[in-house]
Image (tube, grey):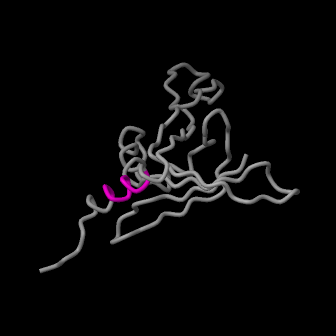
Amino acid sequence: MGGGISGAALLRAADAMLQALGGETVSLLLPAAATSSDLGGQLGLLDPGLQEVVITPVVVHNLPVSNLGPRRRIEFTLPGSAVANQLPGLGIGTAEELFNSVLGLMYGSDLFHIESVAPENFGGTACLYVVTAVE
């Protein structure tokens, strides 16, 4: 009989830890789906706008920067469950595809560019995503 913890239990534990450690909120900015049926929309001549995907709870950690680097560099730890829950509604298959589509990350009123994303896997489940972003 296996004594392993289920993926769902790991995700709940990660969510509880993030809530206890900070519980912040960020928004991932994605290009909105182009829905125009006219020729301009089909050719990509119309700006489809942005789609905002809210992720919470998030832990925020300021990273050191050099005088020559960006103004701010922050590490955001996002819950794997919140990322996974967004995928079906966005028509995106994987978290990697989601993060590759992100145009920017909003934290408060500040816009950041994603520098890197590293999944933290436990028991074969992506429980957390550590996103490093620069302003």
In this picture, residue 26 sits left or right of residue 20:
right
Q: Is residue 130 magenta?
A: no
Q: Quadrant of residue 112?
A: top right
Query: Hey, which residue is sitting farthest right in the picture?
Result: 68
Q: Residue at x 78, y 58 (%)?
A: 65
Q: Residue furthest top?
A: 38
Across and down, in percent, residue 35 comes to 49, 25
Picture quadrant where residue 17 is located? bottom left
- Does residue 55 appear to the left or right of 112 in the view shown? left
Query: Which residue: 44% across, 46% down?
Result: 57
Q: Residue furthest front?
A: 20
Q: Nearer the viewer, residue 63 or 124?
A: 63
Residue numbers of the magenta segment: 11-18
Residue 32 x/y as whole percent: 53, 31
* Residue closest to the eye, 87 or 13: 13
Magenta-span inclusion, residue 16? yes
Specify the quadrant that holds the N terminus: bottom left
Q: Main secondary structure of the magenta part?
A: helix
Q: Position of residue 59 (x, y in %)?
A: 52, 52
Asked if residue 37 is positioned above or below residue 22 in the image, the reply reads above
Left or right relative to 18: residue 29: right
Above or below, comparing residue 84 to residue 44 in the picture: below
**In which quadrant of the rendered image does the C terminus lie?**
top right
Nearer to me, 99 or 9: 9
